[in-house]
Image (spheres, coloured by chain):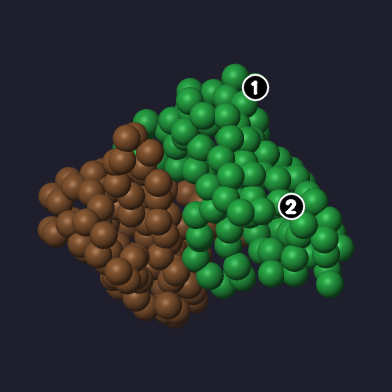
Amino acid sequence: KQEVTQIPAALSVPEGENLVLNCSFTDSAIYNLQWFRQDPGKGLTSLLLIQSSQREQTSGRLNASLDKSSGRSTLYIAASQPGDSATYLCAVRQEEYGNKLVFGAGTILRVKS
Amino acid sequence: NAGVTQTPKFQVLKTGQSMTLQCAQDMNHEYMSWYRQDPGMGLRLIHYSVGAGITDQGEVPNGYNVSRSTTEDFPLRLLSAAPSQTSVYFCASSYSYRGSYEQYFGPGTRLTVT
């Protein structure tokens, strides 16, 4: 059974710092990995999607990497801002249950001004 | 495009009551799913659909029914609400583009069962 773990569970950093969020998964037979952002009381916003054949994806200050063989992904946020404060979720897509996403529990990020 | 919309945003039910959570998408996505989010547990799949007229169970389907009569709509029915169904419910849709299946989520419905 696929399990997704995110470390750390919570992170507090001063504004301007570069930071890395970690995601690991137990079954490397994935189709893709998706990073989401969730603001309190809100839905999920897709940040980046990495196909299993890709190594990384970039969008603005965000860079996500994928090492499928070792079961790891990282989300790098450059020059963090208070507006980046949110919960960040990673999820892997499995063929089981037709396009099912298996989610980690998330990392709660607080960027202090 | 409005994307994925869900109604209601909040709902309080008494144990044993039934209700339907509505979900609609205007992106012509073939895949739609329902997840529930509980504290510290991430999101878990309840039911999903790969197209109109086709539905199947996810990880935690007990106590819920779904139907997919159109591409746009995917309602989730709670047959007899229980306190264990207190959660935040998210509907998602996705499409197959070169195998990507990027998922788009609605804003969620917060359900409390007393």
Q: Are tags 2 and 1 found on a single chain?
A: yes
The image shows residue B78, relative to residue B17, as above or below, that is above
Front position in the image: B12 or A22: A22
Res B5 → quadrant: bottom left
Please name the amino acid that badge 1 sits on: Ser
The image shows residue B100, relative to residue A108, as above or below, that is above
Residue drawn at 30 percent across, 52 percent down: B32
Res B16 → quadrant: bottom left
The percent coordinates of residue B39 (x first, y second) are: 62, 59
Residue A67 in the figure: left or right of residue B87: right
Residue B92 in the figure: left or right of residue B65: right
Residue B4's disc is none
Res A109 → quadrant: bottom right
The percent coordinates of residue B94 (x first, y second) are: 33, 49
Question: In this view, which residue lies farthest toward the front?
Answer: A60
Q: Is residue B57 visible?
A: yes
Residue A78's disc is 2
Q: Nearer the viewer, mark 2 or mark 1?
A: 2
Q: Earlier in the sequence, mark 2 or mark 1?
A: 1
Which chain: brown?
B
Residue drawn at 83 percent across, 56 percent down: A17
Q: Dot 1 surroundings within 10 Å: few (below 14), some, or many (20 or more)?
A: few
| Chain letter of the residue beneath label 2 in the structure image | A
Screen quadrant of the C terminus of chain A: bottom right
The percent coordinates of residue A43 (x first, y second) are: 49, 65
How much space separates mark 2 and mark 1, taking CA atoms? 24 Å
Front position in the image: B46 or A95: A95
Which chain: green?
A
Residue A70's disc is 1
The local secondary structure at tag 2 comes to: loop
| Chain letter of the residue beneath label 1 in the structure image | A
Residue B28 in the figure: left or right of residue A68: left
